[in-house]
Amino acid sequence: MSSLHTDPEGGLTQDDADKRLKQFGQNRLTEAKKKGFLDVLLEEIREPMIIILVVVAVIYSFIGNPADSLTIVVIVLLVVIIEVFNINRARKSMEALKALTSLSSVVYRGRKLTEIKSRYIVPGDVLILSAGDRIPADGRLIDSYNTKVDESSLTGESFPVSKFYDRIPEGSQIADLFNMVFSGTLMVQGTAKMIVTGTGRNTEIGRISQLVEEAEEPETPLEESMNKLAFILAFVAIFFSVSIPLIGYFEGQPLDLMIITALSMAFATVPEELPIVISVTLAVGAYALSRKNAIVRSLRAAETLGNVTVIATDKTGTITENRMNVGHTYFNGEMKESSSVPPTEFMDIGVLCTGTLLSDIRVSSKYKDPMEVAVLEYANRIGADIGHLRSRFEVIEEFGFDNRIKMSSYIYREDRENAIYVSGAPEVVVESSARIYENNVAREITNADRERILESVEYLTEMGERIIAVSFREGIDPEDTRESLERDLTFAGLISFVDPPRPEIKSAIRRCQNAGIRVIMLTGDHPRTARSIANSVGINHTGRVITGTQLQDMDDDLLSEELGKVSVFARITSEDKLRIVKLLEGLDQIVAVTGDGVNDSPALQTAQIGISMGIRGTDVAKEASDMVLMDDNFSTIVDAVREGRKIFHTLRKGVRYYITVKMSLVSIFVIPLLLSIPFPFSPIQIIVIELFMDVAALGGFVSERGESGIMDQPPHGTGSKFLGRSMKTGIIFGSAGLVVAVTFIYLYSYFVTGNVIEAQTAAFATWVLSHVFLAQNLRTEREPVLRKGFFSNRIIVLWGVGVVMALAVITIFPELQVLLSTASLTVPDWLMIIAASVLSSFWMEIVKLVKYRKGGIPG
């Protein structure tokens, strides 16, 4: 108070407040710097791929078809719009952080209580807080009564925290600062007076907001691979689109024909559809994910999911049900599971000790104490008559939980007799008890009784359960002090509470582990609770738990080493979580992080994929994440990973098909060029091939069902490349098959008939049919198409039928023959074309069939 120069009774004067407002600024978070549309446009235009596409579009608008030029321009605009959307996400994160600050607050100004806009609060202001208030700034309590604050959005702690105004040891972590309250948290119970110590950026939320701004989204493996691939393909396409027609011109081909051929080849081979292929595949995958309660906020998440190697999950509500249940009861000297029904007298005492009778008159029933709710639900479940208790007992006084004495109590009147019912930390209640209640009789408590009780407490604590002891004392004077009333108690028993794991969580984690995905737990909860839950669901194989304090004493090298051994981290802060994520990524791991609170947003923003909770998640967490779980269920993450792997495999098959087609199209021109004969395709045929072949077939890959065993394979991780050795080999051999088939038919027809148009028609027909069979053979990687069903993919079948019909039409009708430079073909020609087309890629099916029968997995 002396450092803030304020009066704890009267607050600041208005003049002082105005001066401090100028000094510290308004109590709000500064927005991140915005990028406008023109800024993004300029950045995108500098990209090599965009420059190439723009140049091609401009040239094509003068010589070629203006409609094709317009198509390329539209693609450039789509890329820019996507970038604008990504930048807009950062701005929304900051807006959500600002929204956590309440609109108005009650403050002392000039020794008078007044209500002001929260943005005008300054350090040194004295505020009055009540149940239900959103705390507008960080501050030190100077008075409190029965105060509880929900800090789950800041610390991850699932229970409301009791607050008091006494001094605490220096160096305490946020979760242990019992005399401090923080901006954005919620008053659950009681009243308090606080002196503001920090506003705006100088609060815990303000500090976290800066971490969110500084956090950078990493480039995904696919984005990195596709950027490199697009650049290489563009370079190769432009090189051959220029060199092949140029050589043709020097060999005597007409100049205007070579110019049109060059532009047609550029149009057909420059990979302008690659962003569309990826976006369409990811968009369809994102829709499939939404049907599994996983809403993808950025398409990059749909791709990254399939390659996740580590899932860093919080505990409360994701692994557990986020609902307190009674776990065990201890009465009459015996420990019982909650399935055993305790005596009615014991549950009556439990209800009276926890204040459950007051549950319908709380200021805000939405924020009841979870233990209180658990006792009430358990009492109702076993048949306790709560209504009868309410009619018998009248509440006279309530002493809220005091963290110093670790007890709470309620004074009741029954038939003019007064009694106090006390609950609290077992060791404190046992120490304050002079008697023990067993078999409906109170007797003197012995040291042996105390030892037996505390042994039971230790047993339950090791199981990760939270325990309260319940006791009572009859015949009291309500006018006595609290200290004297909470002595000479009669110990009645213990009630333990557990936030149980979700029923399906153990099998979900096992599925992750079978898929080569490691699951680690990052929680703000107690180490024993974290260890117990982790052990019960199969996460913690070593039994070790690292706390936030231990973690902060480790350097990065030591912590990186421990990350390979330890899977459970407890009592960690937002900085700890962010540090763990960064170190895991530094170990070449692809990390998915779950979170729901303000404290989780930096880690969600930094991770390759951030996953927020749709039910209990804060707006900040949702805006910083890539995916939102609508049911807050870890099992949904596993389903999403499976869908992500399907998306990844679909992309790989689609891109393999796409590159195979592009490479073979360029290669087909090489041999005719060396032989100094006309090219196998006319310019108009090249354009027709591009317009209705590639992208139409890729739609079929998107609709392909996932192959079996997709979750029995390890993730690809950062060490593997999207265009790996097996994929490159497949592309080379696939292209070679098409090139050999088309070149053989073209050369045979050209040298036998001497008719260029007829030879080009035969080559064109072979190319088109080879596309159809290639798409069929590439739509599976492991399973033979014959086993999966030749007609199982209706889109590819319908596309293939449509292509064959179109091919027949343009080679039969004279009007179309003139337009597309085609000619009629004989039956022997068609038989040879069909045979060459089938053989061009059918060898792939034979390889898959052989390896599938041997139990292998083709690359």
Image (tube, helix red, strand yellow):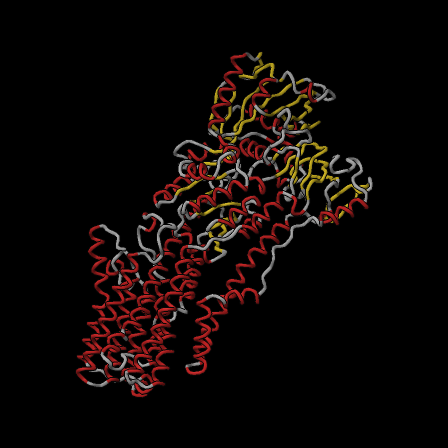
Find residue 185 and report its image quarter.
top right
37 on left or right of 500: right
**The N terminus lies in which quarter of the figure?**
top right
Nearer to me, 6 or 838: 6
Q: Residue at x 54, y 62 (%)?
A: 84
The percent position of residue 162, horizontal first and vertical second, equals 63, 32
Horizontal relation, residue 68 to residue 451: left or right: left
Is 738 placed left or right of 84 in the picture?
left
* Image coords of residue 405 (percent x, y): 64, 24
Depth check: give the residue in front, 205 or 675.
675
Q: Is residue 436 left or right of residue 835?
A: right
**Camera-side residue of 600 and 197:** 197
* Residue 303 drawn above or below residue 472: below
The image shows residue 797, relative to residue 157, as above or below, that is below
Residue 395 appears in the figure: no
Q: Position of residue 473 (x, y in %)?
A: 64, 19
Residue 510 at what x, y percent from top left?
37, 41
